[in-house]
């Protein structure tokens, strides 16, 4: 049974959501088994406490990525990781914010971008920020985004920040082999940091994939039900 304050916050999320789902799965409101700092913040400050939780988690995760980038002098911090960090601490038990979706999402984005660069003859070309926009570059970027979205749909591994990662690579900003390795490493590092910080601050974030009843996708195909309807 939910506390009255939690019931009100869920109603507020329902009213604000673009998709009308009463229980916005995986969000900070109503995380089962919350403890420590997360439980204290929400218990004392409600949604404002959740806002502080998201802000603190994002701050620490990005700061850690920036520290590693500074120490190793490598591009371990890039724009799309900001969106990934936000998902880790805003919807920590939702599918979209799990380590599985983050890793698969960004890695598919990297692979799609490399494929696009090769087929458009841009593998060794300078970045778009040096040469300017060309038809080949537009094609490479568009194909990389299309492939990323389509493949992630097939894999049921939605992670919107991956769309930004694939553009970063297909635009040539970080497209050399060593840079691609650093991009992949940056994804792994911030994913590990996000999971560890959630656990330390009081959210039982899944180790890999979302669990049923704790942020699993609300969209599930039930063939028998569909057959009965037809």
Image (cartoon, rainbow, N blue to C red):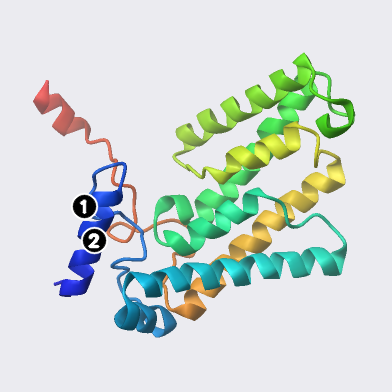
Secondary element type, mark 2: helix
The x and y percentages for residue 50 are 39, 70
The residue located at (47%, 55%) in the rendering is 97
- Image quarter for residue 34? bottom left
Secondary element type, mark 1: loop
The x and y percentages for residue 16 are 29, 50
Quarter of the image that includes the N terminus: bottom left
User: Mark on residue 78?
Assistant: none
From this view, report whether residue 26 is shown above or below residue 48.
Answer: above
The residue located at (51%, 28%) in the rendering is 150
The x and y percentages for residue 88 are 50, 61
* Residue ranking furthest to the top: 135
The residue located at (69%, 70%) in the rendering is 64
User: Mark on residue 22?
Assistant: 1
Disc 2 versus disc 1: distance between alpha carbons? 7 Å
- Image quarter for residue 222? top left
Residue tagged 2: 10
Side of 211 relative to 174 (left or right)? left
The residue located at (30%, 47%) in the rendering is 17
Pointer 2 and pointer 1: residues touching (CB < 8 Å)? yes
């Amino acid at each position: 049974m939910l506390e009255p304050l939690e019931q009100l916050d869920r109603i507020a999320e329902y009213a604000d959501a673009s998709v009308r789902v009463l229980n916005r799965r995986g969000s900070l409101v109503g995380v089962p088994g919350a403890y420590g700092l997360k439980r204290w913040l929400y218990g004392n400050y409600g949604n404002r406490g959740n806002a502080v939780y998201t802000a603190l988690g994002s701050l620490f995760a990005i700061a850690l990525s920036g520290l590693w980038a500074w120490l190793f002098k490598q591009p371990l911090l890039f724009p799309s990781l900001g969106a990934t960090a936000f998902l880790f601490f805003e919807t920590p038990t939702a599918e979209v914010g799990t380590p599985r979706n983050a890793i698969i999402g960004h890695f598919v984005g990297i692979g799609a971008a490399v494929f696009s660069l090769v087929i458009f003859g841009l593998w060794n070309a300078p970045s778009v920020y040096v040469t300017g926009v060309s038809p080949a570059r537009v094609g490479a970027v568009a194909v990389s985004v299309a492939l990323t979205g389509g493949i992630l749909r097939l894999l049921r591994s939605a992670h919107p920040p991956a769309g930004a990662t694939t553009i970063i690579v297909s635009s040539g900003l970080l497209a050399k082999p060593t840079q691609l390795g650093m991009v992949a490493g940056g994804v792994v590092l911030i994913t590990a940091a996000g999971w560890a910080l959630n656990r330390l601050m009081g959210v039982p974030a899944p180790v890999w994939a979302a669990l049923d009843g704790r942020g699993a996708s609300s969209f599930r195909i039930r063939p028998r039900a569909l057959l009965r309807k037809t």
